[in-house]
Image: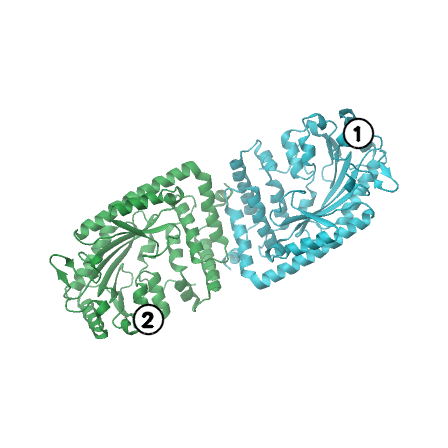
Chain colours: A cyan, B green
């Protein structure tokens, strides 16, 4: 079973899985996204097919002449098959809006620009003409910002971007105007959930101008105790201030989570260990797994790996499971569109294979 | 951890665990019990301390002179420590009534007679002066009856039993009068429960004069899909007819259960396999297990072992877990009275040890 190739580009959007960043057991990834528009074209919502095609043309030329990462490819959404779009969605390189526009008129000019092995990518003609993003492992807001900024510069040299000297970058939605910057961190907070402190922490995050969402962004449920923390405002502060603010708040959340875990292990250590091992036992032996099921079990096991209660099990393994057991990735590995029950069986088989190969808790641990 | 000794008598009541009898994956054990009273003494409920002591004296003498199994010992309940009484209760060699009378006046004359390695035992001065029982693996009603009958003969030669030529053996409770025989089979019916046919089957059993109870007899809940099927009446039929009737009905129940399992595997095979493997995963890795938890998981795993879905896992192993992870057995293995949470941890550790040592499903099976 090979699930690590997307056509000719092996690892679009997979860099963060290596868990190489700081606190990557708690902060899965940091993402910085910049919204940009070209001067002289209507915003996407009001653009005609020709406008969007012209915009894509301009961006493609800029990408060719600018200092873009080697191997950069422009992938028109209309040319992607259904599965590729779903794969890019699961990799967080395309929005469901953009992926869904592929086959109709508004799909004209819609594209994803990415390079293998690189943490940066671009959506073209999504809500804004350009949405640049960087996606890195762990809590690395400044690095993520620098990466996005470099691509912004590399492309911007060849493009005339819509910029107002009072407002900053102009965007389709006013909430993005200014820096056009949205920075977010995907954090895993089982300790705060289990100690029931999470509501207080989320409220605190809201009070300092940040917002919290579920795993798949706006409107999605919180599954498996994974939360996305991001800035709400983009205007009136510098990019550095915005990412620095996010970084400081997420650092505080990490410390609160670590404390919650200490309290948990002190006051309910055996119950918590039991939860963790039961999650491991189910992942290791289940024959059917829904994605929600999986995420909830991964949450327990991730806590166990982070607390070093599951010897030999690494966070990088769990990141991989999280990515490659998503629906489109499983379909791709199977070489066909799976039915719902088939996919649950393939997911469980994939998880067993990974855990069987990569993690064998010693018998002494099992008999402890 | 040694959990297989009870003082000097290693295996009182453990013979059935070997799963040597027919259909022992579905029928855990068959038990035949005979109620007898001595002529010339009041029934236990109305007996004075001296009466009961005289009864025990008469029975002890009969046991010494009769053809009893070698190593037969008479164990007065009053001389047993609390844990021994609980162990005998878990082995189904003593009733909670008799065990509870140990320290008070009514405890005088109360005793258990048993021999190591033998399937027969006797309660003295429980509801009747004598309650002889045989307990064997699988569905073996005629053998169980013969074993009980042999002991009845061996003892009866030296005793004058209360017998009426119209009514048969006279007993304290009229429902036992006649043969004084109660035969029961402990059966595991997960297929009928999962296919929701169990109610119909239980109703049918009731209509042919048999009764169904939970694992621990009258008034106990059905846990883990284990049911006790026994005869209700003891009068008006021969012993052979009674045990033959039970045997035929239980045989029918076994066939119905096997058919239900076939339907289950045909119509919901992957869901059933998932249930079985999840139960196995939890047993294999849980850190805390209540006995109810354990029995429910053992039910799934027993079904899996019976269907040969869990390679290398034998029913005899599961019988052992069922016996030795009961509270008093765990306390005995620990050498002290465990607290509730401690006992859950010891139970989980014991189960992990047994499954870790005795069952290693091949990797190919796990990655299936």
Residues at marks 1 and 2 on the same chain:
no
Pick whichever, A309 or B291, lies toward us.
B291
- Mark number displayed over residue B344: none
Q: Residues within 10 Å of mark 2 (few under 14, many from 20)?
A: some
Q: Classify A71 as above or below A352.
A: above
The residue that label 2 is drawn on is B80
Mark in the foreground, 1 or 2: 1
In this picture, residue A80 sits left or right of residue A285: right
In this picture, residue A225 sits left or right of residue A161: left
Q: Residue at x 35, y 56 (%)?
A: B220
Label 2 near label 1: C-beta < 8 Å? no
Look at the image and tell me whether residue A268 can be seen. Answer: yes
Instruction: List x then y, in percent, for residue A368.
Output: 51, 60
Q: Residue at x 65, y 45 (%)?
A: A215
The residue that label 1 is drawn on is A55
Taking the view exactly as shown, the residue that stands out farthest to the left is B165
Disc 2 chain ID:
B
């Amino acid at each position: 079973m090979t699930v690590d190739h997307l056509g000719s580009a092996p690892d679009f959007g997979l860099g963060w899985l290596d868990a190489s960043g700081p606190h990557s057991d708690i902060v899965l990834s940091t993402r910085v996204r910049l919204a940009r528009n070209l001067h002289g074209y209507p915003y996407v919502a009001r653009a005609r097919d020709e406008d969007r095609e012209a915009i894509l043309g301009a961006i493609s030329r800029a990408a060719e002449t600018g200092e873009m990462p080697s191997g950069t490819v422009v992938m028109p959404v209309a040319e992607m098959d259904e599965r590729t779009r779903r794969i890019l969605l699961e990799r967080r390189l395309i929005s469901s809006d953009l992926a869904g526009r592929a086959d109709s008129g508004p799909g004209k000019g819609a594209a994803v620009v990415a390079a293998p092995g690189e943490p940066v990518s671009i959506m073209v003609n999504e809500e804004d003409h350009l949405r640049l993003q960087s996606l890195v492992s762990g809590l690395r807001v400044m690095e993520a910002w620098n990466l996005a900024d470099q691509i912004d510069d590399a492309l911007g040299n060849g493009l005339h971007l819509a910029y107002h000297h009072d407002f900053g970058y102009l965007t389709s939605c006013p909430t993005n105007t200014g820096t056009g910057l949205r920075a977010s961190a995907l954090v895993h907070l089982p300790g705060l959930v289990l100690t029931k402190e999470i509501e207080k922490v989320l409220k605190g995050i809201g009070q300092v101008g940040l917002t919290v969402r579920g795993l798949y962004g706006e409107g999605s449920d919180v599954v498996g105790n994974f939360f996305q923390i991001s800035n709400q405002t983009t205007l009136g502060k510098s990019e550095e201030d915005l990412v620095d603010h996010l970084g400081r708040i997420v650092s505080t959340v990490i410390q609160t989570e670590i404390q919650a875990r200490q309290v948990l292990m002190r006051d309910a250590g055996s119950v918590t260990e039991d939860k963790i091992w039961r999650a491991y036992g189910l992942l290791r032996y289940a024959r059917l797994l829904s994605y929600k099921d999986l995420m909830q079990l991964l949450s327990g096991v991730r806590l166990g790996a982070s607390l070093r209660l599951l010897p030999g099990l690494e966070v990088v393994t769990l990141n991989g499971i999280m990515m490659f057991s998503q629906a489109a990735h499983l379909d791709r590995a199977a070489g066909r569109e799976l039915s719902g029950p088939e996919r649950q069986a393939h997911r469980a088989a994939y998880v067993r294979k990974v855990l069987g190969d990569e993690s064998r808790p010693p018998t002494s641990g099992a008999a402890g």
